[in-house]
Image (cartoon, rainbow, N blue to C red):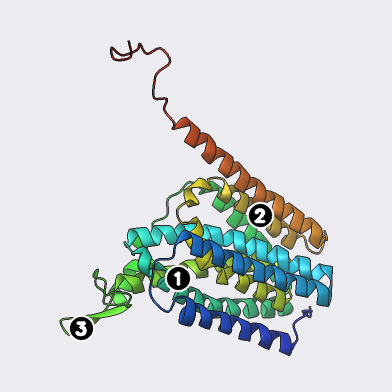
Amino acid sequence: METQTVGSPALWGGFILFVLLMLALDLGVFHRKTHEVKFKEALAWSGVWISLALVFNLGIWWKFGSTPAMQFLTGYLIEKSLSIDNIFVFVVIFSALKIPSLYQHRVLFWGILSALVLRAVMIFAGVAMLERFHWLIYVFGAFLIFTGVKLFLQRNKEEHPEDGWVMKMARRIIPSTPRFDRDHFFTVENGRKLATPLLMSLVLVELTDVLFALDSIPAIFAVTTDPFLVFTSNIFAILGLRSLFFVLAGAVEKFSYLKVGLSAVLVFVGAKMALVDVVKVPPALSLGVISLLLGGSIVASLLKARAQERKQVVPTVAPNARPTAAAE
C-alpha cells in the first residue's frame, strides 16, 4: 500500500522552519526571563496556537480541497483532546515533586521540544510499517479499542507517576537531590553534579508524552495515513500544550466526564481503523462524531461541576431558624 501525501519538500521545509522560528521566539523573546505564567498570558497564547492551526487548516483547504482539510482538523481535534488528558498527569507530577509554578514552563518547554523529535520518529516509523504491513492497521485498531475500554474502566483511578518504577529507576541511574537550584536541571553539592527535581519532573513529562503518543498517533492514522497531515496536526496540538496547561491546570478536576468522552473517541476511531476495508467512513462524518463525543463530555462535565458548586452553597439562615435576640 503506497501512502499518498499532500506534503511537498517545500511544504515540509517551510513547516519545520515555522516551528523552529516559533520555538525560538517563545524561549528567546517571550520567555527569556523565568516568570510565572499567568492565566491571561496562557489564554492569549492558547488563542494564538489555535488560530495558527485554523489558518493552516484553511490553507490546506484552499490548496488541496476539503477532504485533506477535514482530515487535518479531525486529527488536530483528537490530539488536542488527548493532550488535555496529559494535563491531568502533568498536574500530578508537578504537585508530587513540588515544582514551583515559576519553573513549570521551563520543564514543559524542554519536554515538548523533545516530544517533537520523538513524535516525528514514531509517525514516520508508523507510516513505513503501514506501507509494508497493511495488516498492522487491524492491530492498531484493536489496540485503540482496548485502550479506550481500559481508559473508561480506570477513569476514576488516581495517577501516581512519581512512585512508579520509571522514577525509581531514574533516581538509581541519575544521582539527584531534592534541593532546587533556581531553574537549573543540575546543581553541585559537595563537589558532585546532581539532578534537581526539575530534571526528574522532565523525565516523567517526557515519558508521559511517549505513552500518550502510543494512543494518539494510531488514532490519527485512523483518520489519515498522510504523514504530512499526521505530523502537522500532531505538532500544532503539542505546541499549544504548554499554554493549555496553564489555562486548565486549576480546573482539570471539573472535567469529570472527559475521560468518558476520550474513551468513546478511541473506541470509535479504533473500530473505524479495524473496519477500514469493510466500511468507509466519510471524513465529515468522523469529524462530526468526534466533535459530538468530545463536546458532549465537556458540556456534561461543566454542568456537573456547576451543580456541585450550587450544592456547596449553604444558606446563611436556616429555613426554620428562630430570629436571634438582636433581630427581635
**Residue 97 percent coordinates (x, y):** 32, 63
**Mark 2 secondary-structure assignment:** helix
**Mark 1 secondary-structure assignment:** helix
The amino acid type of the residue labelled 3 equals Arg
- Residue annotated with mark 3: 192
- Residue annotated with mark 1: 108
Question: How far apart are the two marked residues, 2 and 3, measured between alpha carbons?
Answer: 49 Å
**Residue 104 percent coordinates (x, y):** 40, 67
**Residue 82 percent coordinates (x, y):** 58, 60
Q: Residues within 10 Å of mark 2 (few under 14, many from 20)?
A: many
Looking at the image, tell me whether mark 2 or mark 3 is earlier in sequence order. 3
**Mark 3 secondary-structure assignment:** strand
Q: In the rendered structure, are the residues bearing label 3 and label 1 in contact, judged by CB atoms less than 8 Å apart? A: no
Which residue: 70% across, 68% down? 54
Instruction: Give the side of residue 322 with respect to residue 109, left or right.
Output: left
Q: Which mark is residue 265?
A: 2
Question: How far apart are the two marked residues, 1 and 2, measured between alpha carbons?
Answer: 26 Å
The single residue placed furthest to the left in the displayed view is: 190
Residue placed most toward the observer, 100 or 44: 44
The amino acid type of the residue labelled 1 equals Leu
Figure check: 196 above or below 251? below
Looking at the image, tell me whether mark 3 or mark 1 is earlier in sequence order. 1
Figure check: 270 above or below 51? above
Q: In the rendered structure, are the residues bearing label 2 and label 3 in contact, judged by CB atoms less than 8 Å apart? A: no
The amino acid type of the residue labelled 2 equals Val
Which residue: 50% across, 58% down? 247
Figure check: 81 above or below 29? above
